[in-house]
Image (cartoon, rainbow, N blue to C red):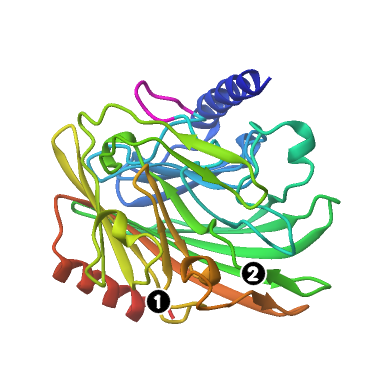
Amino acid sequence: MTTQLLRLGVFTFSLIIASGLRAAPAAPDKGVTVVPNEASNRVDVLVDGQPFTSYIWPDTLKKPVLFPLRAASGTIITRGYPLDPRPGERTDHPHHVGLWLNYENVNGVDFWNNSTALPADQQAKMGTIVHRRIVKTSSGSDQGELQVEMDWIMPDSQPILHESADFIFRAGPGRRVVDRISTLTALDKPVVFKDAKDGMLGLRVRRELEQPSTDAVTYTDASGRPTTVKAMDTNGVTGLYRSSEGKTGDAVWATRGRWTMLTGKVNQEDITLVMLDNPLNVGFPTYWHARGYGLFAVNPLGQGVFSNGKETLNFTIQPKQSATFRYRLVILEGAATTNQVETLYHQFVDEVK
């Protein structure tokens, strides 16, 4: 049943891509163009007429995501599975799709691990983030913008949070940038983000950008469901994490930092991915949920988990109150130095208040 659902999801997504590209209005050849196509549950972002990424909300996903993401060269940096599987890539964690934002424990309900790969009875206990409307799109010579609204829905079908998300897409020579600025507003009851491992802004990278490992590892989510990441051939796998605090490789996981970068090669093309935290965010500097198998995530709220109980947060948004989370992903062609990334970090802090 799970395999059939995933195949159906791939087929449906392929149809969405095809119909979306046919139905969308023609895009200008220059600049960053944001092209909504609500009939196909997508908004396409193009740079000089070439695809950069798409904001999508198909029925086969339990939250809206950006998928896929590309470097300036056109090279895709995100994993294809489960929407567009590629030979030789991992098929674990089907809820890891593109670039997304959610959390594992929101008033006791798991939003992070939900997917159509789960049995129906388990899906019924999970949270779902539902796209509601496109508020605004704009295009320009060097940046475009997409504003959307979503609701975080509990298993009883009642919304618990309203999200207003502002995506800013920037482009330059050898560079692509995505800002996600999400404001979460509690509705009629307090919303507690209990300390948990899985959150909050997540990116799942392609196989070549994973860190080489020959070990099989099993991870368990908050509900006790195990997921095994199998050992695989590491030929062509070149990724390496490095944080603002000088941590490298697997040592980045469960440590704080203002930024972390992931460097690697795809078909001999050097690529650097940089994820940046912002001093205005809760929990700054964030903990990094950066796994060698390709999950590159920021989790400012799981402080009890990552500190082995030395810290506690259990962040709460009171009724009718809001919290804003500001993050930037930079995709660079070529290798980058820590000094270059520091410059990117200060630019982000100066630009996003």
Q: Identify the residue under disc 1.
A: 285
Residue type, mark 2 in image: Leu
Residue 107, percent from left and from top: 74, 64
Q: Residue at x 43, y 71 (%)?
A: 286
Q: Quadrant of the N terminus?
A: top right
Report which quarter residue 302 is drawn in.
bottom right
Where 143 falls versus 129 (above or below)? Answer: below
Query: Is residue 86 shown in magenta?
Result: yes
Residue visible at 58% across and 40% down in the picture:
226
- Tell me where the magenta segment starts and ends, as one range: 84-90
**Which badge, 2 or 1, comes first in the chain's sequence?**
2
Predominant SS of the magenta segment? loop
Which is nearer the eye, 51 or 257?
257
Please give left or right for residue 244 compared with residue 327 in the image: left
Q: Amino acid at mark 1?
A: Pro
Q: Secondary structure at mark 2?
A: strand
Q: Check residue 241 in the rendering and tell me which mark sits there, or answer none.
A: none
- Residue 152 in view in this figure: yes
In the picture, which quadrant includes the C terminus? bottom left
How many labels were placed on the picture? 2
Indicate left or right for 276 with 100 as reference.
left
Left-right relation of 67 to 174: right
Image coordinates of residue 352 in percent, x first then y, are: 41, 76
Q: Is residue 93 visible?
A: no
User: How would you rate the neighbour count of disc 2 (Cα within 10 Å): few for under 14, some for 14-19, many for 20 or more?
Assistant: many
Q: Is residue 211 magenta?
A: no
Quickly name the residue at label 2: 184
Q: Are marks 2 and 1 in contact (CB under 8 Å)?
A: no
